[in-house]
Amino acid sequence: MFRRLLSRLPVDTFLLLLMATVALAAVLPVRGQGAVWTEHAASAAVAILFFLYGTRLAPRNLLEGLLHWRLQGLVFAATYGVFPLLGLILVWLAGGWLPPALALGLMFVCVLPSTVQSSIAFTSIAGGNVPAALCAATLSNLAGIVMTPALVALLLSARSGGFNLDALWSIALNLLLPFVVGQVMRPWIGSWMGRHKALTGLVDRGSILLVVYSAFSEGVVAGIWQQLAPSSLAILVLLDSVLLALAMLGSWVAARMIGLKRADEVVAVFCGSKKSLATGIPMANILFAGQAVGLVVLPLMLFHQIQLFVCAALARRYAQATARAVNQTPPVARELQPAA
């Protein structure tokens, strides 16, 4: 009954879980040796997550996606070119209205890779090219292992306290290596993993919640949340919303300009405008070690939830428009209609 009640709420269930995790960290933050063990557990969960990604990606799908160079190039340019530029502009416009840690976090959002799970899900709902979305999102995350630290070094080194190759090595060890091991193991366990897709989703969300609990507990113990004013939070929500709107609009316009088909346009809009919480929080723990990581990842957490709400609505509109084009009602629209 409780699960049925959650499914009827107009709020994403994962958002509720994130809010509950933050509340738990505020009331019962993990301390001392417990914090160390929690951090190790979170790192292990993220490694398992990328191992599962590796077992699910067929090399043939990766090759087919690579051959669609215009779409992949557009997603890559939006993720690692347009986003950082937008971030620089918005942070400059915000001036001194945001605390340094939140300004750093907003820029960090802009240099992260795209999501995997939700990009594919929304592309499927919208009637887009799902194999291309899988390839674009996976390539974005693999490229992010190098691109995100490089962009942090280029754009954020003055605020983040510098960057060294040890951080790149840690990211490769925690994210890339498990993915490669998953690819190697795919011939033996790939089919079994395909029949248990819920396992990846469980590890995905569980790892995020564990890392969020660790990061916010650290912030509570250090007393950094007294520094966050309600006005700063409101400005941050506004900037995240503007950032997402500009990224989605830019991806849509660019897809139309280069003549992508509608199914590929859907991929460009969803993959080119989203940022990964599952990859971003572990990277933040490595790249900004010793800083107020809880505040740094707050812009990412807000952006993640905003993008879920907006993309869910947009996916339904795409599905309805596609259905009208073939003169039929989409399943999603039927579900939204009130019962007689």
Image (cartoon, rainbow, N blue to C red):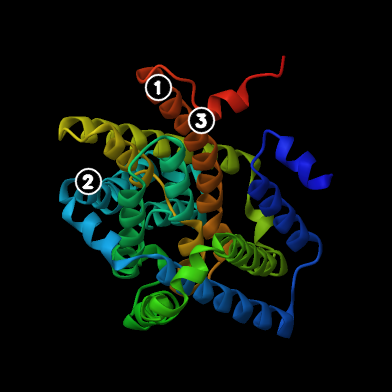
Of callouts 3 and 2, which one flags the residue occurring earlier in the amino acid sequence?
2
Above/below status of 177 relative to 258: below
Above/below status of 258 relative to 141: above
Front residue of 228/178: it is: 178
Mark 1 residue type: Ala
Of callouts 1 and 2, which one flags the residue occurring earlier in the amino acid sequence?
2
Q: State the image coordinates of residue 56 (x, y, percent, origin top left).
A: 43, 66
For residue 140, side relative to residue 314 (left or right): left
Of callouts 1 and 3, which one flags the residue occurring earlier in the amino acid sequence?
3
Any part of residue 319 in sight: yes
For residue 306, side relative to residue 327 (left or right): right
The residue under the point 55% across, 65% down is: 293
The residue under the point 36% across, 47% down is: 130
For residue 235, side relative to residue 107 (left or right): right
Above/below status of 17 relative to 288: above
Mark 3 residue type: Ala
Mark 2 residue type: Leu
**Circle 3 residue:** 313
User: In which quadrant of the rendered image does the C terminus lie?
Assistant: top right
Above/below status of 14 relative to 313: below
Q: State the image coordinates of residue 67 (x, y, percent, origin top left).
A: 17, 55
**Circle 2 residue:** 71
Quote the CA–CA distance across marks 1 and 2.
22 Å
**Circle 1 residue:** 321
